[in-house]
Image: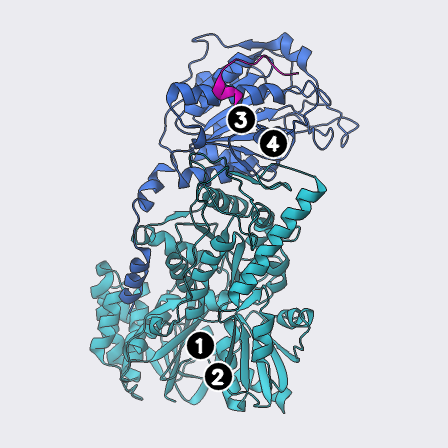
Chain colours: A blue, B cyan
Amino acid sequence: MSPEQPAGKPAGGLISPAQNTWCPGCGNFAIEHMMKSAIAELSEEEGIPLHNFVLLGGIGCHGKLVDYLNVNSFYGIHGRSIPAATGMRLANPDLKIICHVGDGDIYAEGLDHLIFAAKRNSDITVIVHDNRVYGLTTGQYTPTSPFGFRGRSTPGGITEHPINPLEVMLAAGATHIARGYTKKVRHLKDLFKEAILHRGFSFVDVLQICATYFNLTGYYDAHAYELAEGEVETGRFESAQEKIREWDYDQEAPIALGTFYSVEKPIYEEKFQALTAGKPDRRALVRKMIEGRR
Amino acid sequence: MSEYSVLIGGRAGEGINTAGLSIARLFSRLGYRTCMYFDYPSLIRGGHNFAIVRASDMRIGAHRTPVDVLLAFDQNSIEHHRQRIRDTTTVVYDASTVVRGQGYGLPLDAILKEENAPPITGNSAMLGALAQVAGIDRDLLEAVLRESVPAKHLEANLRVAGRGYDAVENVFTVEPLDAPTFPVLTGNEAAGLGLVHGGLESYVAYPMTPSSNLLHFLAEHAQDFSIKVLHPENEISVILMALGLAYAGEKAAVGTSGGGFCLMTEGLSFAGMAELPVTIVMGQRPGPSTGMPTYTAQSDLHFVLNAGQGEFPRLVAAPGDLEEAYTWSSTALMLSWKYQVPSIILTDKTLAEGASSFDIETVVPHPDQEPVLWDGAGEYRRYAPREGGVSPLAFPGREGAVVRVNSYAHDEAGFTTEAAADVKLLQEKRLAKGESLRAELATYPTVKAYGPRNSGATIVCWGSEKWACIEAAEKFGARVVQPLVLAPFPVRHWKEAMIGAGKIICVENNATGELARLLRQQGFDPGRPVLKYDGRPFAVDELEARLLEVLA
């Protein structure tokens, strides 16, 4: 399944020749195409050159996305995209750096990096392909699988409750927090654009159905709704927290989609920028230091 | 040979390290070559810390057991070092705490109270006493204090130093030499300076002894060097951040010790696969596991040679002194970029935290090396095949290029592939870079030899044991051979250096003979082992005694 393609040259040229190997009906298609459209539109509307986008992938089905788009890519290792993204942003402030990560990838293997990137307000975008199951390793529970989930490593059902990643992000200091759903593609695209344009750390948890191991389409269709204008005060922590807690990824409840929180704070990388400005003759600086120590 | 050894000991938190460095600077100002061994347990306050400063009119790089002057802040500093005290040793002790002392007792409590000076200034009293005992000019002492003490506390320190100076008697005279004053640096500082010389733009590290001081040194001087210094949440983040920097075109290095390097190994293998340059300063300390955090060992050689899943080329260099730490850190960074391979500078606590005279004039600079950059022609392919295996680099943000790096097996463009032909081709390309690197290193001093050939005996050693071996070997007229590069192993240089080796002895700071094992793997005879694995480096006289057992 692939959502309907908006026509237009830039977006069309962004699909790479790599062969797509996702399962039919995979939620990743929607994320791929909406990211493609988001990049194409940002390039046209905001004048961001296509060569300034970088996509990072972790390991899992989500990671394949970076092969499928004709954009600079860093296909990294499991759970570790985020520190590499911060490194890139440190090296080149012009880059628009987007981490595609999985729920097992970043809520289990790499949670430390996610929390610290939010804490330091690293100017990167994190898109979580949250299908709440390990796909590529064939069906084990992840940190967002609901209580009782029967996976291949937990055939008796898990006895732990999921984390609410949005609440974790809010507590960690993320300055932009949103949630999307792969069946609401235009909404998803707008969330991507908003997140990429946000100055600072932006986070989008995407409820992505896994056609093979955990197909929650019916559940999400019944419970998901788009936040209305003004339904949450996105500049106020308490308001965001209340709305984020409406659904805990476990109990049956309405599932809000949209932006929960968005504030401006100083960007981590900016204070380092001045340090390497210009092209100093570092060898002369070394010599001076040595002479000064006599 | 004119030489002096001074030990200063006390509890942690009393500034023993700083005092030791001041003593080394005092001798440096008199034209002496100095080296300092600093011994301290893993705690913040209490315990027993000591520094041994050795000064000589000859090039030295290791301490000896006996000392000429012992400066003791407490009873432990005498009891722990009885074996160092000879008839000629002058002991100066704090009479406020030491009950059984022979020599000069300084009433430190009373002095500090009368001078209304903080406890840390007790070090200056000891320095003052040392200057008087050793016939060192009082003005020179004051000059060294002016350089090392913050202005706010300078006056108090000068007063207290004067009291120490006046409280003892002159015993001998350190004659000033007609020689330049060399800067006194630690191995970590020399490595940091070398990295910056080699083009470092960012340094990323998580604190871990014995490499924390490299982080501190570069962080303190980030503005002076115009570099970024970053301290993220753990060593995994450290190496990935460095790889992100490298991908975007910025030269980065990281520093750690064994435990942190364990966490970096997945990133190291990724660097090997993705062909991202990174330089790792790996300061060894005794393991397994937490081991002895503040002591020394050479027990991670095979770990760094083999770390990371899969097969990929890497550069591993083990400097033996400040000059080698400086040149090889610089070279490792440059070669890492030229060949797009990870490079490792393997040091240990002895070298990293030890201090000695640094003579930049004797440094023979290695050639400058530049990365191979994309010329902009045609379609960019990150892993395009090329003679020697090195593909031209482009960085994201470059118009006309889509830059793909990949941890999966990939094709020339960087797309994931499992096709047999592509996988084989790219593996051969990566390994070809290792061979190119090996060929390049043929023009570098990858193996050093000291002393005459055909002397009947050759001592083989690596890293920080270098100078103890050179000095001990002189006693036996033996030759010393030291491999600087351990991967790719410099087979030809090794063969040449070992012609006429005679009886071979392999000296190492580990329990199993790690260099010996590497030599056997390469088809060479490592000879008889002389090993020390108690967390301390060899003292020269201790090594002489051990060599005598083998050579007799």
Judging by the rendered image, the residue that carries numbered circle 2 is: B471
Residue B80, visible in the rendered structure: no
Q: Are marks 1 and 4 in contact (CB under 8 Å)?
A: no
Q: Which residues are magenta?
A: A1-14
The quarter of the rendered structure image containing the N terminus of chain A is: top right
Q: Is residue A259 above or below residue B71?
A: above
Residue B457, visible in the rendered structure: yes
Judging by the rendered image, the residue that carries numbered circle 4 is: A63
Q: Are marks 1 and 2 in contact (CB under 8 Å)?
A: yes
| Inter-mark Cα distance, 3 to 4 | 11 Å
| Inter-mark Cα distance, 4 to 2 | 57 Å
Q: Is residue A226 above or below residue B33?
A: above
Residue nearest the viewer, comparing B485 with B264: B485
Give the label, 3 or 4, closer to the camera: 4
Residue at horizontal 32 percent and vertical 50 percent from the top: B226
Among the two numbered marks 1 and 2 on one chain, the one whose residue lies closer to the N terminus: 1
Tell whether position A13 is magenta.
yes
Q: Amino acid at mark 4?
A: Gly
Give the label, 4 or 2, closer to the camera: 4
